[in-house]
Every structure is written in C-alpha cells, then in structure tokens.
Image (cartoon, coloured by chain):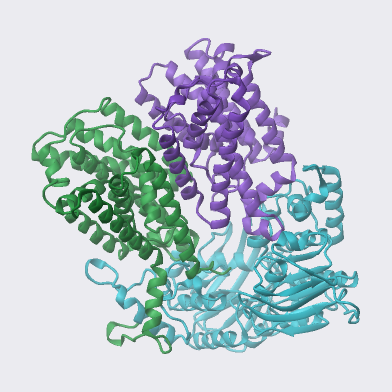
Chain colours: A purple, B green, C cyan
Amino acid sequence: MTAIAAAFGNLGPIRRRVIYAYGAAIAIFLVGQVLHPGFAGGDSVRTILLVASFVGLVAAGQTLVILIGGIDLSVPWVLNGAAILLVTTGLGQNGRLPEALALTLGMGLAVGFANGVGVAYVGVPAVVMTLGMNGIMQGLSLGLSQGLTCQACTSYAPPLLQHIELNTVLGIPEQVVLWIAVTIAVTVVLGATAFGRRTYAIGNNPTAAFLAGIRVKRVTVILYMLSGFFSALAGIMLVSYGGQASLGLGDPYLFQSIAAVVIGGASILGGRGTYLGSAAGAITLVALVTLLSAENIPEYGRSIVYGVTILALLLLYGRERRH
Amino acid sequence: MASAEHAVPAPPGVDRGAVWRHVSLQNAPLILSLLILLGTTGLYIVFFNSNTGGLPGSFELTSLANTTLPLIFAALGQTVVVLTRGIDLSVGGMMDLSNSLAAAEMHATLGSELLWSAIIIAIGAAGGLLNGLLVVYARLQPILVTIATLSIFQGLAIAVLPQPGGAIPSAYTSVLTNPNQPTSLAYVAFVMLAWVAFRRSSFGIATFAVGNDQDAARARGIAVDRTKVLVYTLSGMLAAIAGLFLAASATAGDATTGDVYILQSIAAVVLGGISFAGGRGSGVGAVAGAFTLTLLVNVLFFAGINPLYQQFYQGLFLITAIVLGAGIARLGRVGRIGR
Amino acid sequence: MATAAEQTPAAAPPDPAGPAVEAVGVTHSFGGVHALRNASFSADFGEVHALVGENGAGKSTMIKILCGVLRPDEGSIRLKGEEVRLLSPKRGRELGVATVFQELTLLPWLTVAENLLLANEPRGRLHLVRRGRLWPAAASVLERYGVDGVDPRELAGRLPLALQQRIEIVRALLEKPDVLFLDEPTSTLAEREVQWLFALVRELRDANTCVIFTSHRWREIERIADRITVFRSGEHVATRVSATEDEAVTLMTGRTIERIYPHRSPAPTGDPALEVSDLAADGVNGCSFAVRPGEILGIGGLAGQGQRELFMTIFGARRAKHGTITVAGRVRRIRSPSDAIKAGIGISLVPEDRKTEGLLLPMSVRDNLTLAVLDRFSSGGFLRPRPERAAVADMLSQLQIKTQRPQTQEVGKLSGGNQQKVLIARSMLATPTVLLLYDITRGVDIGTKHDLYELIAKLAADGKAVVFYSSETEEMAHLCHRVLVMR
C-alpha cells in the first residue's frame, strides 16, 4: 500500500491531477449509480461519453491554446458557423460531403489562422482577438444565413455523417471512437514530438523559447488554427448528431471547454497540462450535468450546483502555487 | 520632503514640452479611446442625419445615456478588476440576479424602493466578496472562479424570477433612467467624479500598484490581499447597480438580459484602452468605451445595416480599435523593471 | 559548525550602545535545504559592513531574515540591542530597517514621483492625493539625493536599468532608516554612479546609520567597507577589518584558487568565422568587427551603450536596419534566433538573465538542454529518446553538472551555478561556430566563475569564435584576446 502511495507521490503534480480528474468522473458515476440505479450502466455511460465527446473535441483545441497561455473565446460561433456551413453546403447529400467537410474545416482553420496572426504577429491579447472573431463569426453566420431562414438552412446533415452518430464499433459509438483517436493523436503530439515540447516551452517562457531558437509566432498560429479546426469539427459532429443546425448551438461549449481543461489539471497561465486531463475533465463535467438533470432539479438548481461543484473541484486541485 | 512652499518647477533641463509629451504618452490609450468615441459620434450624427434629415436632439441624447448606463456600471466594475490583472465573468450573472430581484420584490413605495436597492447592492457586494475571497485566499484563477460564480448567480436569478415578468415601479424608472429628464447625465457626471476620487484615494493607488507588480507592491507595504478582495467586492456592487439600471430601463424583469453584458463589459474595457495585463487604464476610458458601443449599434441601425450583421461589425470594430491601440503603445515603450 | 568570529579590533570603535543588528544562532531551511546553519552576524551603527560569500552562502537569506521578509526556523534577532520578532517587512520598516533588494520594487507603469512617494503622497481634502504636488515634491527629493536628469513624470519602466536602481536606492533612503541593507546595489551601476552611491553611503555612516551591503566586486568592498563578514555554506566564517582578495576567496570557497583566470592561448590568425559590417539596429549605429575561430573577443564600454542590442541583432533576436553579417565567408540573412542557430550558420547566444530569458524553470534538465536542437533528435517529428538521452549525458559530464535524473529533475531546483551551466550546455549542443556570451558571470559566485572561465578558454581552444561581454571589465581584460569598446 505504501509502495503504491510512494509511486503515486512520485508521479508529479500533472499526472496526479489527471488521475484526480478521472477519479472525480468515477466518483460522479458512483454517486449517480446510488441515486439512480443504472446511471453507471452501459447505455447511460455510452450516452454520457457521446455527449462528452463534443466537449472533448472543443477542449482539445482549447487545451492547445491554453498551454501557451492563450485562450479561444471564438469557440461558440466557429462551432455554430461550422454547423450552418455544413448543412448549407452538404444539402443532405453524401455526394457533396467531401466538399462540405473541406469547406467547413477550412473555415475553422481560417478563423484560427486569423486568431493566431492577431495574437502572435500583431500582439492583440488573446481575450480580445478571439472575442472579436467570435463576433465576426456570429455576424457572418447570422447574416449570410439570414438568421437561419435561408432555403438551404433547414437541410439535414448528409446521411453518412448521421450514421457516425448512430453506428457503433464493438458497442462503442463511432463518434466516441473518433474522440478516442483524437485523444491519442493530441496526447502523442504533445508528449512525444518536437512540436509538443516546443509548445510547453512557449507556455513556460516565451522569451526563453524564442532565444532558444523556437519559432514562437509560427507555433502560436498553428495552435490557434488547430483550435479553430477542433471547434469546427465539433460543430460538424453536433449537427450530425442533432440532424439540423440551430442557433446558439455553440454557446455552452465555451465555458465548458475551459472548465474541462482546468479540471484536467492544466494551468490557465500556460506551460502545464495534458489533453488526457482535459478529456477526463470533459467526462466529469458531462457526467455531473447529466446527473443533475436526472435528479429532476429545476434548471436554476442545476446552474447553482454546477457552479458550486466546479468551485469544489478547483479548490481540490486548481490552486496556483503559493509564492 | 518638500512642502508646498518649496514647490520647484520642472527640474532644470526639462521643459513644458516634455511635460506634455509625458502626459500624452502615458495617457495615449485614453486619448485613443476618446478619439474613437469622437469618431463614432461623428458617424452617428452623419447617419442619423442621412436617415432622418435632422440632428440628434436632447431626446436622443437622453435615450442614449439611459441605454448606456447599465453598461457603464458593468464596465467600471470590470475595469477595477482588470486593473489588478483579473477578470470578472460573473458581472452578467449578478446583473441578472439584481434585475430579477428588483422586478420580483420592489413595490411602488419609496420605502420598498430604497430598501430593495440597498439589499440588492449588498447582495452584489456579497457576491463580489465571494469572488475576491476565492481569488485571494483559495488562490484560484479569476477567470475560473468567475465562470463558476456566474453559473451560481444565473441560477439564483432564475430561481427568483423563473419567467420574465414582475414590475419595476415607474417612479423608480423615472429616477434612474428618466426618458424625459437628463438625469442620466447627472449619473454619468457622478460616475466620472467618483473615478477621479478613486484614482486619488489610497484604495485606488493600491489597486494600480497591485496590477503593476503584486510582489513589488507587497514589498512596498501595500495590502495586496485586502485590495484584491475589495476590488472584486466593488465589482459585484457595481454589477448589482448596473442590474438596477437595467431593470429600470426595461420596466419589467428578465433573468437573462444581463448575460450579454459579460462580453460587452469586456469590449467596453478594451475600447477604453485599459490593459488586461493590469496596472494601467482609466475609468473614463471605460465610460467612453461604453458610449462607443451603444453609439455603434445606433450607427449600424441608421446606416441601414442588416441587424443580423451587427455582431460582425462590433467584432471588427473591436479588433481594429485594439490594433490601433497596439500601434500607439509601441510609441511609449515601457520595459520591465530590472530586466 | 560555527567558528568563533575572528575579530580584529575595528578601526572605529563601535557605538557604545551595542550592535545595530545582531543575528544569533540563526538556522533557516527552504524545503529541506539549509540556507543558514546556526549562523551569526552583527553590524554596528556608524559602520559600512560588507557581507560576502558565494551564491548560496546565505547572504540574501540573512538579509531577508534581518529585515523581516523571512522568519528564521531557529535563532534570535536583535535590533538596537533589543530582541525582536519581525513578523513582516512592515514591522522591520517600523523599527527603522530599510532594504534595497536585487529585485527592484519599482512599479513600471507608475511615474517616478508616484513610485518614490508611494504611501506618502501629499494629501488634500478628503485625504485624496493632490497630484499636482507630486511632481515638485519628487523633484526636490531627487535633487536632495543628487539624482539628476530624471523627470519625475517619467514612467519608471521607461528608465534605463541603472537609473531604476538609483531611484530604488533613493526610495529606501527616504525612509530615513537606522539600518540599511543593500543587496548587490552596484551590479547595474557604472563607475560614476557607484561613486554617487558610495558618497551617500559615507554620508549615512557619518550620520551613524548602519549600512550593510553585499557585492561580488572585490574592488568596491575594499573601497568602502569598514568591516567584512564572510559566509560560506550557510555559516559565518570570519569577520575582518580588511582582507586581500585571495584571502577572501579562500574564506568564501574553502579552497585556494591558484589563479582565477585560466592561461590565455595565443591570439589566433586566419580567416574570420564571423564578420559584422556596418551593422545598425535600434541602439546600434554602424558596428563593424571580425572574430576568428579560437579567438575570444570582448565587447566592452560602459553599461547600456548598445552591447546587448548588438548581441541580440547578430543573433537575429532584433531586426537589423542595415549592414551585413558574414559567417565563414558567406553573407547571411539572420532574421530570427532560429535562423542563427541552424547548422549552416551556427551562432549561439547565452543570454544574461538565465531565469527570465534563458531557462524554462519548471521543465526538466533534459528538456532545457535539448530545446535548441530538437530536430536532431526527431525523425518524422517524433522524438527519439535514446539519442537524446545520450547527448544529454555527454553534455552533463563535459560540464560537470551534477544532477540525479536529468529527464525529470526540474531545472529551477538546481543551484545558480548549475543552472548557468545548463544554459551554456544548450548552446554548446547546437555545435556553434560562433558563441555569443552576454554577461554570463553576472550574479555567479567565484567558484562557478572560475569553472566558466576555464570553459570559455577551452571552447576557444577547440576552435570556436567567442564574442564576450561582461559588466566586469577586469574579466574581459583577463580573458579576451582583444576588446572593442562601444560608445
């Protein structure tokens, strides 16, 4: 027992937080199982993982950007814009799917590029740049779709995409498989590539990273592009899940993605954290929200408990170092 | 230390020109925000005229000020927090709560109005105090704390007023956001005076010091922790007051109309030239930023821009303003202390 | 364990009322590491007392305890003869202790006047500050203390470093202390400014103030100190009225260093490795020079004459307005440090401030070491741990950096000397042809300095071209083959 405790202590604070995050998720499942037998059962877990995958996808981009001390507030309307763009270019036809995907993901990359250039080359603070881009995307999405009343706007997502939501592989929804693949990819990039090492270096000390020959601006732009990509991807997945696009689709995901990243052990100041932790954070949050709905607490109660629980989790391991 | 009698004019070798140079360099962001306000006002007048053939009169001015008052207070709360390098995302939630309470509880008697105003402001202080304590003593990051408390305040707001409704006494409205009398201008003037006093008070100086360099401030004997707690408390109070003005201007209550002010208050702070790195900025800029934002909406309206595109222009405007500001900041380069 | 204080009779008799400050049997640790062990120290009114020792000897810790920033684990403190418990720096200030730390406490976006008069501003009605009175009040303060050429309306962050240091000193003097601690006050000051400081210090001493200061520059200590206390490894070693530099070094390091500076190889001839022609940038006006492989070239001059900007421009960290840089006979465009480090060009820079510009403190030794050459250890973008580990181990042994597990050891926890070595090792891993070393011995103790000098000599002997800047001209005189002066 003490050997395990010693090994645990040796893991280092980051890895410990990841374990705490998964522990929190498991704890919520257990509490849920007690209050609602079946909460921790197969169907329920599957659904929760499915919903968590959307948060998780957005959190992937958010993690990358937070790691270098930035933030992406353009998530809501890149996501929503992507959903609208997908249905209006896909028009519910599989034949148009490649074109629609390219356009939509390209849009996400383009917005990310703008964000990155603004932050890295022009020196606009990330809060402002991404906030402004969010407004721009909102205006464009609403304007170009005429408030989602355009003719093509009521299209469904192409059937192939819809199937991703419904089909399963070995009992796991394909959507979740996609998320697992993303998790592996991002974790590997961050942990085992030169790019990942440079990302952490920038997050720790951009000046030192620059003087060590890292192309800080270029890496920053790439990371924001990836964040835009993941937001767009989440939008595509969401609209496939729901079938049709709607307004306000992306709003909950901004704060949820930030919370997931922090609960997963990352520092909002940058330089510390892993995507594995953010993924755990996403699961924890969604499990919590699901449990609260199952409790038949009226909506306002859910908000309050949600906020209190985030605070509790932060108090447990979200504290910054003392000087 | 010299007393007033020994007042030495500018040290030898430094001339009046240098003084003006310093003043303008140091206040460059504020000057820029005032210029932006001026420019936007110009656009407003132009488009108003081309649309109606006349010039905006006292009615428009009063209405403009009334609409802007909630944002002014929200932006000021955000300003003091941002000055300490923090951020307060819960202002929207506190405005919701304040709005709901006023609509649900206030009766059309002077006693009730005064009592509930006081209670609501006290609740704002309590909410802000919670934020402050968590940031300072639990050492949690402001963005995270206020995301969580935002959720809590929003929930409480809906609990108080589950459906839009309730009623704000018309007497209250006529005091706070009178459409016929320029009382709003009196409030704006009061707010500016309050800022000037704040800037010259020990609390205000401490706020700026903390935002500059927390550790240096502490080494200089500034009560850093107490200042930060107070700053969040003040922000909560100002958000509550903003909610009261919001309620007064709407005459009925709604537990979600405050939400949009989260991002609006941040935008006003940005347009006001206040730096998110803390330590510099003026409340006057925040007020200017608030007016700019309201004027912008009117400009878009009178220019006949499709309202659906409103956010597009606001976002573009915001980014352009800050890029200009960044360019100007390069003129007054300030390095770190001690490199 | 503590040795008895070796006291020769002081030149001036101590104040009959007893020492101004006294620390008795003080022990203090940081997370298990002893900074002070049963250490004692005392200084009198009306004297200038130098506190010397290597980095990590405990000088700063002792000062922090004596002014109230830290509370000792064991031991007692006496101020003006009375035992006190200093629970905060504020308490220390109340008792008449003022301190100027190496980390300046100026607030960059506040004006000089606001900084100087913080918490003591001229007030008016409602206890609000009268801003109009700030400027003349500050101006007269600056005049009184002989700091000219500063406009009190100037933002503190826009002042050059030396001026910031002087304002910080004035700030402390404004408190009219009975005891003044100065931690490395001269590290950023040029000779004229050092004279200014020492004049003030003498004034204070004559007014019966107790002044305690630390410095790594022996010349200054000789000039101004009435007594010298040596600390080593957290313990008080000796207190003397005077000592030679060799004696001091022996006391500080516990060993005799035969020669501090290594033997200098003969000046090389041959084609230059680096040629700079009419290079201009912000702060650099048309510099030209050449340096050959095996040569150590010094860039000297008073502090703040553009040396840092020159180094940064050559390294690509700043944009050159015009001029050319020729490496191994080919004109090169260097637009970023990334360009400079690349194998084809091979210029590496070791910056002056390892904590803020060099190292990534929370990251591991390994991560810090290989940061500049990650491409060498990756294929297809993926890092290959084994070649990386081998290269790291090789570097660690070459530079004698002692660390248990480089893959996980946080570089921030290493000693200052080892941290500096890691930073230099990073540059060396990039196998440069030209090494730009900017003030790498600043704030480094004499033992490590000696190691660094040997290293520099060896690098030159191996055929590298070294461009060297140090704030101590003596170092440059001893180490360099040639020194160019910037003005």
Residue A215 vs residue A297, the one in the foreground: A215
Q: Position of residue A52 (x, y in %)?
A: 55, 25
Residue A282 in the image: above or below residue B15 = above
Residue A83 in the image: above or below residue B291 = above
Residue found 64% across the figure and 33% down from its top: A276
Is the C terminus of chain C in the top left, top right, bottom left or bottom right quadrant? Answer: bottom right
Residue A55 in the image: above or below residue C301 = above
Residue found 74% across the figure and 81% down from its top: C288
Q: Position of residue B42 (x, y in %)?
A: 29, 58
Q: Position of residue B41 (x, y in %)?
A: 28, 57
Is the N terminus of chain C in the top left, top right, bottom left or bottom right quadrant? Answer: bottom right
In this picture, residue B15 sits left or right of residue C304: left
Find the residue positioned furthest to the left.
B109
Res C324 seen here: yes
Residue found 41% across the figure and 89% down from its top: B12
In this picture, residue C220 sits left or right of residue B190: right
Residue found 35% across the figure and 40% down from its top: B306
Residue B329 vs residue C450, the one in the foreground: B329
Residue C341 vs residue C94, the one in the foreground: C341
Res A269 seen here: no
Residue B255 vs residue A217, the one in the foreground: A217
Q: Position of residue A90 (x, y in %)?
A: 55, 25
Quadrant position of residue A94: top right
